[in-house]
Image (cartoon, grey):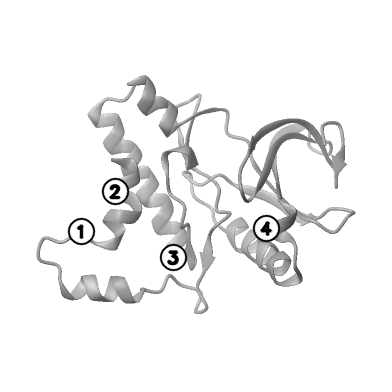
Amino acid sequence: MIGQIVSHYRIIGQLGEGGMGVVYVAEDTRLGRRVALKIPTAGAAGDNQNHARFLREARSISALNHPHIATVFDFGEMEDGRPFIVMELVNGRDLGELLRAGELTLGRAVEIVEEVAGALQEAHRHGIIHRDIKPSNVLINERGEVKVVDFGLAKLTEEGRAAASAATDHEAETLAGIRTRSDVMLGTPLY
């Protein structure tokens, strides 16, 4: 795909690949800036239902405006019908790399957790549940700014807000010293 143009984005190189898709560095030929271009795998976007869900989620995520969420600039369909999403390119390292290098002080780790929690709170306020928080989906750019990325597994609630699951309801009834679901979803990966 290197050198190909998707809409008005020229693919320069590959950033990463996962089970849900491939992320490329691309140049926005209209604005002259570098962006991240995500194209789901054929299996992830294959049928009409998944294709429509991908575009619906891209539209919802693009409405998020938070300093700690990578901004979605654009989305659409390629000439072959596959969807794509264009987002802010975050130059830096992921949290996992920083942890393995032993470069985080306790104070900085607490700041990162607070910033990720704020990003997730904003997503939940818009009815979006990330569902894949892990160190590799928390990027720290060259200026030290934290960005949550890869809402590819995000779930949209029907009501337009984050709804509680049965497990969360049960946990609410048994708060006496038991980890809550938010601890598992945020605290454990960041620990």
Bin the neighbour count of mark 4 within 10 Å (Cα to Cα): few under 14, some 14-19, many 20 and up: some
Residue at which label 1 appears: 179
On screen, 36 above or below 169?
A: above
Closest to the camera, between mark 4 and mark 3, is 4
Examine the image and state in which quarter residue 83 appears: bottom right
x, y percent for residue 99 = 36, 28
Mark 2 vs mark 3: which is more N-terminal? 3
Q: Circle 2 — which element?
A: helix
Per the model, the C-alpha gap separating discs 2 and 3 is: 19 Å
Per the model, the C-alpha gap separating discs 1 and 2 is: 10 Å
Closest to the camera, between mark 3 and mark 1, is 1
Closest to the camera, between mark 4 and mark 2, is 4
**131 left or right of 166?**
right
Disc number placed over residue 125 in the picture, else none: 3
Tag 1: residue type? Arg
Contact, CB < 8 Å: mark 1 with mark 2? yes
Disc number placed over residue 44 in the picture, else none: 4
Bin the neighbour count of mark 2 within 10 Å (Cα to Cα): few under 14, some 14-19, many 20 and up: some
